Image (cartoon, rainbow, N blue to C red):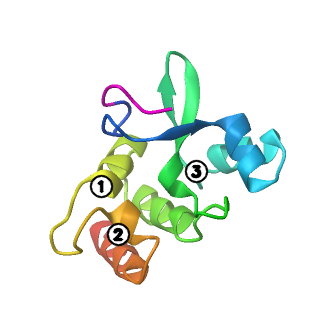
Amino acid sequence: MILEKDTGGLPAGQEVISIPDAAERMGVVVTKVMDLLNKGQILSVRVKGVRYIPERFFNDDGELNKFVPGVIALLADGGYTSEEILGYLYESDDSLPGRPVDALHGHLAREVMRRAQAMAI
């Protein structure tokens, strides 16, 4: 599903997937995805009362990107809200270049982690 409007820090036009779809993609039960959400290892947004997870949190093979929980934890420990974390991940940064959420899928992932750590101080 594509977000039609900005929701919970996630800009309009972003692809999101339902929790059951995320579980299927990851090859786990829904309760495992709920556990990741409850522990703050991944984030979701609500659309008409239903929770959705940003599709960019996953790799092409369906697995959760290994850097996503770390970036979320660093920023959350620094006092950032879920909305602020999603805003940071999806805001274009010319110095990367691109968005941090996209950089997590390439050779700049460690740079995004370093920046998140610096922001959380």
Label 2 packing within 10 angstroms: few (<14), some (14-19), many (20+): many
The residue lying toward the viewer, choosing from 39 and 86, is: 86
Residue found at the far left of this picture: 94
Instruction: Return the mark for residue 40.
Output: 3
Left or right of 71? Residue 10 is left
Label 1 packing within 10 angstroms: few (<14), some (14-19), many (20+): some
Q: Who's the residue at 37% across and 48% down the image?
A: 86
Give the extent of the magenta segment.
1-6
Q: Quadrant of the C terminus?
A: bottom left
Q: Which of labels 3 and 1 is toward the front?
A: 1
Q: Is residue 15 above or below residue 92?
A: above
**Quadrant in which residue 23 is drawn:** top right
Instruction: Return the mark for residue 88.
Output: 1
The residue singled out by tag 2 in the image is 116
Q: Is residue 93 above or below residue 57?
A: below
Task: Estimate the x, y position of residue 5 in percent, counting from the top left.
Answer: 31, 26
Q: Who's the residue at 79% across and 40% down the image?
A: 30
**Sooner in the amino-acid sequence: mark 3 or mark 2:** 3
**Quadrant in which residue 98 is drawn:** bottom left
Q: Are marks 3 and 2 in contact (CB under 8 Å)?
A: no
Does the magenta-highlighted stretch encompass residue 4? yes
Q: Amino acid at mark 2?
A: Ala
Task: Estimate the x, y position of residue 79 in percent, counting from the top left.
Answer: 37, 53
Label 3 packing within 10 angstroms: few (<14), some (14-19), many (20+): some
The total number of labels drawn is: 3
Distance from label 3 to label 2 (Cα)?
16 Å
Query: Which secondary structure, mark 2?
Result: helix
Q: Who's the residue at 35% across and 56% down the image?
A: 89
**Sooner in the amino-acid sequence: mark 3 or mark 1:** 3
**Quadrant in which residue 101 is drawn:** bottom left
Q: Amino acid at mark 3?
A: Gly
